Amino acid sequence: MPERESSKLVVATNERIMSRNLESVIEDTYWELSDPIPGVRIINTWQIYHMIWLVLTKTESGHYQIFRSENMQSYALVHDHESEIYNLFWLDDGHMIFCASDGWWVTTDTGLTWSHLILGSLAPQARACAAVNLDERLWSLVAYGIDHKLYHSEYPSGEWSVALDTTAIWTDKWYPAVSGGPAGVLAGAGSKLLRSAEAGAPGTWQQIQQVDGIIKSIVASNQSNTPTFLVVVENVDGSADRFYLSYDLGDSLEQDMTRIDSVSSVASVIPTGTDNPSTTFAVIGKRSADQVPTYRLIEG
């Protein structure tokens, strides 16, 4: 097993990756900067394996490119894609998938090579996907399509099917918020909080809550037992986003008093090289280019 890696907060500027050790005694203003990464903008970054990171960028010609680093300093191009890549999703150490406008793709070698992934004739286009680990090398994928439909497939041998069309219950402003684990998957449809107790399968979704605002993001802390969920709610009047914690699969929501005017991303803080699940969430606010971001840590 790799040695325990300290928790890092990693964010992107226009052309570099910024990181800082969350367990460091160095003052909060200290950030490490990577070498410049080619592209007109960095879209996001992910840790795919112990000390190995992937970065998604967009080029001037409209291509989407994935860069890979083993030291968070220098990044090498490993994949060039002509069509839009919507998002990357982590499955297991060294194992990720991504959704693009031309289908789904997969890597099992820490991002060095990518191959086309076929899960039946239907290929939803999605910016959000919950990957629920059901058994060794078996996952339930719950993709939230840009058409506002929830899709389900078992991976690696299943086929995509429509699990729920949320336009039947919500047609106004919407975010593709979905996350969960074997105990349950939560999704947002506008102001409505939905749950599946069967890993997102068709016919298993029900509405369990209605919030005052629009559900912007849902993040689960881990995949063991009953995870802690952080639910971000956007106020209708445009004031600061609100944060709610749930310890019972969404049956109840406890408001956290953390305030950030507008949230750009939320992630569960999970140190690698340890079996201890984390219930800490990093909430990152919107920022100007190349400036240190505003962030808060929320303890579950």
Image: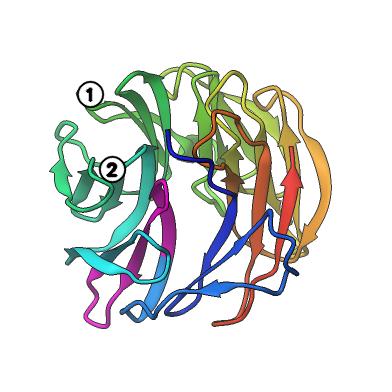
Identify the disc placed on residue 266: none
Q: Rate crowding at label 2 as few (under 14), some (14 to 19) or many (20 or more) other CA atoms within 10 Å.
A: many
Residue 228 lies in the magenta-colored region: no
Residue at the front extreme, as displayed: 3
Identify the disc placed on residue 124: 2
What percent of the width, then of the height, locates residue 34? 45, 74
Q: Rate crowding at label 1 as few (under 14), some (14 to 19) or many (20 or more) other CA atoms within 10 Å.
A: some
Residue 51 lies in the magenta-colored region: yes
What percent of the width, then of the height, locates residue 256? 82, 45
Residue at the right extreme, as displayed: 257
Question: The residue under label 2 is which amino acid type?
Answer: Pro
Front in this rendered view, residue 202 or 222: 222
Question: The residue under label 1 is which amino acid type?
Answer: Gly
What percent of the width, then of the height, locates residue 101? 24, 56
Vertical arrangement, residue 223 with respect to residue 115, above or below: above
Q: Write down the residue under mark 1.
A: 158
Disc 1, disc 2: CB below 8 Å? Answer: no
Q: Quadrant of the N terminus?
A: top left
Magenta-drawn stretch, dominant element (helix, strand or loop): strand
Q: Nearer the viewer, mark 1 or mark 2?
A: 1
Q: Residue at x 18, y 65 (%)?
A: 80
**Which image quarter: residue 227?**
top right
Q: Is residue 4 left or right of residue 241?
A: left
What percent of the width, then of the height, locates residue 206? 56, 22
Q: Is any part of residue 79 visible from this angle?
A: yes
Label 2 secondary element? loop
Q: Residue at x 29, y 49 (%)?
A: 99
Vertical arrangement, residue 284 with respect to residue 230, above or below: below
